Image (cartoon, rainbow, N blue to C red):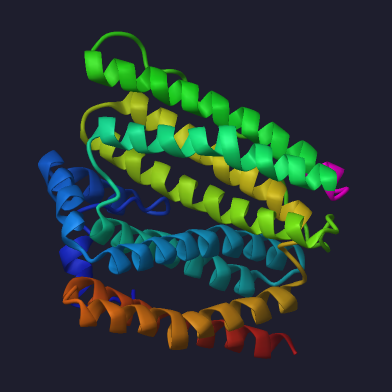
Amino acid sequence: MFRRSIRTLLVGLCTLTAASQAATAMALAAPADQHQATYTAARDLHPQTLSDLTTAMKGEAFAYASYNLYGAQADREGHPAVDKVFRTTAQTELNEHLHEAATLAGVVGTDAANLRQAINGETYEHQVMYRAFADQARKDGDLEAAKLFTEIAADEGRHRDAYRTALTVVATGHGTIPAPPKADMMPVPAGLPKVKAARTKANLDTAMHGEALAHANYMLFAAHAKQAGNPALARLFEGTAGVELHEHFAGEAVLAGLARTTKENLRKAVTGEHHEATNLYPGFAERATAVGDTAAAGFFRDTAADEAKHAAAFQQALNQLH
């Protein structure tokens, strides 16, 4: 762990650590009204700070998803030590950085509020985003991408409908929470992009960031639902999160050529972590400080320090492969 005093202030509020049952128990122990208080308090943040926290969450969620793929590729190439570096860093990005940003931003509300947030996101992806991406991919001749976007749009419609049913149950106390969907695990081997148009490549990048963030948010919502005594809703959130990551993100990653050789993946990780450590997060910290959002500024500074350590660890792993 690289975090200092902010860790003790935030980890008990909203932490879901997949690799640790103890960390999960800590998250579930927080009182329900504490989550709602955090949700409300975030409204006091400056809009730019909230925007920067959202950008941070998207980046950390994407790093988590990508690094797990890079770790799997390193394992396939016979580099277990590199696999460990990628997967350990992935856990930090999700279970520390993203969760702290989400706590500061007040992402998690009541079960009903979380469902409404999920419904809005799924509706947009179903009705607008993926349909537009599919149409553009067809026009650009990327028919495989058009097919995938169309399939995901349909999935998101089913997710929306399940969440709508769940919201009715939560609001009325009557009915049954839908059963969670089951994800088909899709492998993501190293490979070049399978699309040709720059627009399709950009849309795949947007989609992957969205799917990674949806996975992370739904796992947070699941933790809250468990704490609130609604295990069926927690299972629905967890199952949907799995589809977003293991089907949607993975399928898009294959078409985008996200995973390359281990050396290439390490170089990409070093570049990304260095940018976050020296440019992105320091800039966020400076803006947050200027508007008096001191807790957020502290988070951004601490995360920048973490990312510098991650860059160094990836560089060391890369050096050892030469």
- x, y (%) of residue 264? 73, 77
Q: Left of 82 or right of it: where is 89? A: left
Whether 37 is among the magenta residues is no
Residue occupying the point 70% across, 68% down: 74
Please tell me which residue lies in front, 115 or 79.
Answer: 115
Q: Left of 138 or right of it: where is 78? A: left
Please tell me which residue lies in front, 143 or 5.
Answer: 143
Q: Residue furthest top?
A: 175
- x, y (%) of residue 130? 64, 40
- Quarter of the rendering occupied by the C terminus: bottom right
Residue occupying the point 56% across, 42% down: 244
Question: Where 5 sits versus 201, above or below?
Answer: below
Question: Where 19 sits versus 308, above or below?
Answer: above
Residue occupying the point 22% across, 81% down: 289
- x, y (%) of residue 152? 65, 36
Residue occupying the point 77% across, 71% down: 261
- Quarter of the rendering occupied by the N terminus: bottom left
- x, y (%) of residue 294? 18, 76
Camera sees residue 247? no
Circle count: 0
Q: Left of 107 or right of it: where is 212? A: right
Residue span colored magenta? 140-145
Question: Where 93 sits versus 151, above or below?
Answer: below
Camera sees residue 157? yes
Whether 144 is among the magenta residues is yes
Q: Residue furthest right?
A: 141
